[in-house]
């Protein structure tokens, strides 16, 4: 039975996915990456992010010198592949909304990768949650405030954990300060996969 932990409105379902479910999910993601290869996004200032990403669903989130936005096609020009059924099952079980996700962003963290504090603000309806799935190495998840600055709290996310960011947590700043590279055997080469499911429109 998964443990439910709440910090600043972020609802963490510790151990929601068991090891066989994680392995099946990773196998399905290999097909996603084959159809929509990982790419290194840039910030508006032209700086490469340390994570590599791709997506599945009707939209994918992209970042380059033109800014941050959702696009219906991979930067290579092909449509995004569909979201695998087992990932949708997590959304259906935990999101608390009748709407289906239109994007599953796939972030891959290699050794030394991180994600600075940010808000998810590119979606049209902030009443819809973001559901985040962790696979592979542990990541230090930092949770802040709606306004930038102030105190923060951190929590080590393990493989199989799911975080629901809704209600008061929906617009709170959050990020991943670091990963414990090699802390999981799920991914043969190490690293962490983070999946975030979102309603875009």
Image (cartoon, grey):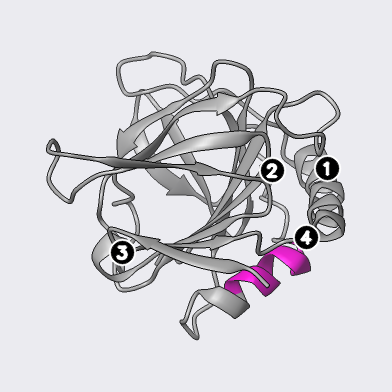
Residue contact between numbered discs 4 and 3, judged by CB atoms under 8 Å? no
Q: Distance between the residues labelled 4 and 3?
A: 24 Å
Q: Give the range drawn in magenta.
A: 84-91
Q: Is residue 75 left or right of residue 89?
A: left
Give the mark nearer the N terminus: 3 vs 2: 3
Q: In this view, does 105 lie to the left or right of 186?
A: left
Q: What element carries label 1?
A: helix
Of circles 1 and 2, the one toward us is 1
Counting from the top left corner in percent of width and height, residue 100 is at 55, 76
Residue under pointer 2: 78
Q: Which mark is residue 30?
A: 1
**Does the magenta-highlighted stretch encompass residue 88?**
yes
Magenta portion: prevailing SS class: helix
Per the image, the residue denoted by label 4 is 18
Residue plotted at (63% across, 68% down): 2
Q: In this view, does 51 lie above or below 107?
A: above
Mark found first going from the N terminus, 4 or 2:
4
The quarter of the displayed image where residue 25 is located:
bottom right
């Amino acid at each position: 039975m998964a443990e439910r932990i709440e910090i600043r409105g972020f609802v963490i379902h510790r151990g929601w996915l068991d090891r066989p479910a994680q392995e099946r999910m990773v196998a399905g993601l290999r097909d996603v990456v084959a159809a929509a290869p990982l790419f290194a996004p840039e910030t508006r200032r032209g700086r490469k992010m340390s994570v590599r990403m791709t997506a599945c669903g009707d939209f994918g989130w992209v970042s380059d010198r033109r800014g941050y936005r959702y696009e219906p096609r991979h930067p290579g020009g092909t449509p995004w592949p569909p979201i695998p059924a087992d990932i949708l099952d997590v959304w259906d079980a935990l999101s608390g909304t009748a709407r289906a996700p239109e994007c599953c962003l796939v972030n891959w963290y290699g050794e030394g990768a991180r994600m600075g504090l940010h808000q998810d603000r590119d979606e049209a309806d902030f009443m819809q949650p973001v559901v985040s799935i962790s696979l592979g190495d542990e990541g230090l998840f930092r949770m802040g405030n709606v306004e930038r600055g102030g105190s923060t709290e951190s929590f080590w996310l393990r493989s199989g954990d799911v975080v629901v960011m809704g209600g008061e947590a929906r617009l709170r700043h959050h990020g991943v300060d670091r990963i414990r590279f090699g802390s999981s055997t799920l991914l043969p080469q190490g690293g962490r996969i983070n999946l975030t499911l979102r309603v875009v429109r």
